Image: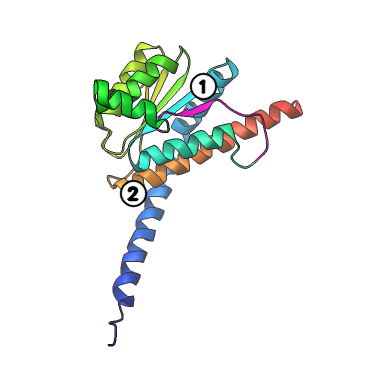
Amino acid sequence: MKVADPSVESESLILNHLEDHLAVVAALKSFTPLIDTLYRRIIESLEAGGKVLFFGNGGSAADAQHLAAEFVVRFRQNRRALAGIALTTDTSILTAGGNDFGFESIYARQVEALARPGDVVIGLSTSGNSANVLAGLEEARKQRCFTVAFTALGGGRCAEVADLAFKAPSPTTARAQECHLLVGHILCDLIEEHLLAQERGN
């Protein structure tokens, strides 16, 4: 049996994704001041003995873990380990909290336990309305942390309660998550360069 050639349809879809991605990434240039502000707040927290907490759901949970790993291990260069924690990884805490207090509580409970004044708390939610991410950010404000929401274009409730909101310039979940990871990588690079400059005495 001859299989139909799908190349024209697939090529069109591939090009649409790439063109959309490139347009959204180009729009990130306008967020340079916001990225710089967040970088400086993270450095301030780390140098004062603080830490960065990350959390999200689904693909955003994976991004939280990815960025925490870049902090603790490294991004591009060898340097001292940084205090980055993903609140998405401990299945015992997540399932106990979800079972005993409800899924909405799973990040707020951990923030209550782990966060201290001056820490940076980053909640990732493309809708901006994930109840557990929102609750985590609200608890972080109670703990006098610097709160950050990574969302898609609309921002949602998370953007309203956070001290700083990065609203990726696209309403599409995939594009927003690509922006979140790119901005996270830029932050990691800035932080590493800062630390290595300090070591060199610059």
Instruction: Say which quarter of the image contains residue 151.
Output: top left
- Frontmost residue, 35 versus 134: 134
Residue 86: where, in percent of width, then height? 45, 30
Q: Which mark is nearer the camera, 2 or 1?
A: 1
Residue with the most extreme right position: 200
Amino acid on which disc 2 is placed = Ala
Q: Residue at x 75, y 29 (%)?
A: 200
Residue 27 seen in render: no
Q: Is residue 187 left or right of residue 105?
A: right
Q: Is residue 136 left or right of residue 51?
A: left
The C terminus, quarter of image: top right
> Residue at label 2?
174
Q: Residue at x 26, y 26 (%)?
A: 99
The residue range painted magenta reads 77-88
**Vertical placement of residue 17 versus 76, above or below:** below
**Vertical placement of residue 74 versus 104, above or below:** below
> Residue at label 1?
51
Q: Is residue 6 left or right of residue 80?
A: left
